[in-house]
Image (tube, rainbow, N blue to C red):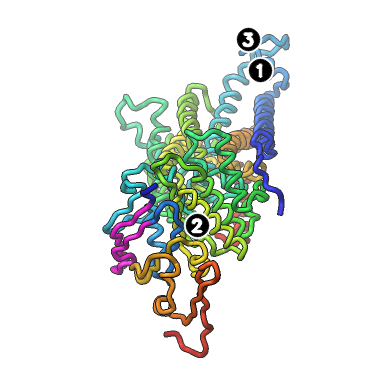
Amino acid sequence: MAVATDTFDPLSDPLQLRRQLILTGLGIALAIACLAAGAIGALDIPIWHVIAALAARCGIDLHIPVTALEDGALFSIRLPRVVLGIGVGATLGVSGAALQALFRNPLADPGLVGVSGGAACGAVGWIVLGASAPAWTHTAFAMPLAAFAAGVAATAGVYAIARSRTRTDIATLLLAGLAVNALTTAIVGYLTYLGTDTQLRALTFWLLGGLGGATWDQIWPVLLLMAAAGSGFAFLMRGYDLLALGEGAAGHLGLRVESVRRLTVVLTALGVGASVALTGIIGFVGLAAPHLVRLLGGASHRFVLPASALMGALLVVLADLFARIAVAPAELPVGVVTSALGAPFFIWLLRRRMGEASL
Amino acid sequence: MTAGLQGRNLTVVAGGRAILDAIDIDVAPGELTAVVGPNGAGKSTLLKTLAGDLIPRSGEVMLNGRPLAAWSQEERALQRAVLPQAPELAFAFRARDVVELGRYPHRKRATPGQDRDAIGGAMHATETSFLAGRDCKTLSGGEMHRTHYARVLAQIWSPLSEDRARVLLLDEPTASLDLFHQHAILAKARDIARQGAAVLAVLHDLNLAAAYADRMVVLADGRVEAAGVPRDVLTEGRVARVWRVDCSIAADEDGIVQVQVRPRRERALA
């Protein structure tokens, strides 16, 4: 029998140190990916020019000549796209981690459980029917909020179907997601049928998921909504740890389970709704990011949530970079890239869990 | 010290049948109360009702002198801990992280030192200290159960105030444990009771119950069949009637009652 370690010191806990290293590493990797995304493209900009241009905006002169063309490409085309990618990826990563905590199931994902589909319904509804809405509603917030509202309905629906007294089992959860996704697909199909030719072209590109064409004017309202959702999640992290014990045991520890559940549904729909409104459905990031960070640094949500944000941002920025250069000069929708990589990952996870016989 | 946990006239109905039928129970501070009874007697239902998970059709649960509903969720968690029969855990937390979850109700008032004392003390008491850094998915069933036991001990590690007894509810805490740990866990539960806590344990093993409980409550068909000190409650006639086994009962030199069940010989199920 080993000696009691009553003198456990959180400050020298090796796992805490490792988590800090992982967070730092993810931050550095994200910064490098962003610089690469700034440098690579139809117009190749040397990476030190990217750094110099960024420094110049911060008032630091690095004495490296940056041409006006480079500066223009960087700040009006590539940077908004990268910033949007960071916002969308972080939101999807955190939302995935939060949904997994809520369902106590590592296979939950905004796309699989129907949040994204619901949000897509709202967004498509706005594209097709928004023209007949009163003029004062036509702001940059309208589409994200329509997506948010429909996303709340879809998430609440899935939760009501799949929830059980004990751990929500994967089969029920996936089937509930399947049902809700079938419904949202039908609604999107019907709306498409109603749409005009111009609306259809907008819809097609949008449904595949893409960061292209983002402008500063478009992205700031979306980023604002995402930041609101993200800061809300920060208050729920400890509660998510308790939820791992089951809703009953979490309640016995004083957690207001009902509030946590409602808040999670609303925040997830807000973040995912905002992201879907501008970029369409980008699948599997919310599944993969929390998974990868849990493999690296364990299950505590005070680590998993921030790390999933960084990991999600990294995945989306890299996927978008790949989408831009893979078939240059044309480009792939980023949703196609994440799904092509994410689906096999999901299948692998599913097989592995079936091996554990806990499906 | 008074109060503790009381159930008055508790009736729970499910499927047209009374699972609990007007039960009165008193879990007094300073005592370990064992609830025993055959399968389906209503033991777990009683524990869930006392924990507030089930709302009884009639009757009332009083926690430290006030109806359960009059305490907020947070206030309940500060004075009362519950160990379920089959604790669950999603995701691969470390054993110490699980025990640390027990300190959640105290996050606004306890110092880091107090938290550490409670976590360390609870893990020491359950012999789980050596598991601290282990991933819970790699623990055996018994080790996992002890880790959860440490979690509920950490939750009520030290008394909050004079007029609020700590309450500990244990649903079959010994089910997945080896002999040594069955006794260790009940001995610890009795220790906590001696320090003023009101402890209730649902148990199947009559000898374990008799060895550690100050009071025993026998449930049968949703009713209290008998309640009192073990040596009064456990009689050969009652065990035969309630559990449908032949037995002989003797007290050892310390006055601890031992139930010896006679093996069945070619007798069909009654």
Q: What residue type is labelled 1?
A: Glu
Q: Where is residue A15 in the image (x, y as percent from the top left)?
A: 67, 40
Q: Which amino acid does label 2 sit on?
A: Asp
Determine which quarter of the picture holds residue B39: bottom left
Q: Residue A169 carries which label?
A: 2
Q: Earlier in the sequence, mark 1 or mark 2?
A: 1
Please say whether residue B261 is visible from this viewpoint. yes
The question of residue B17 being in magenta is answered with yes
Q: Where is residue B48 in the image (x, y as percent from the top left)?
A: 40, 57
> For the residue labelled by badge 1, is the local secondary structure a helix, a strand or a loop?
helix
Contact, mark 1 vs mark 2 (Cβ under 8 Å): no
Q: Which amino acid does label 3 sit on?
A: Gly
Which residue bears the numbered disc 1? Answer: A70
Q: Earlier in the sequence, mark 1 or mark 3?
A: 3
Which residue bears the numbered disc 3? Answer: A59
Say left or right for A232 vs B116.
left
Q: What stretch is highlighted in magenta?
A: B5-26
Which part of the image, by quadrant, shows the N terminus of chain A? Answer: bottom right
Q: Residue at x 60, y 60 (%)?
A: B181
Say left or right for B59 vs A289.
left
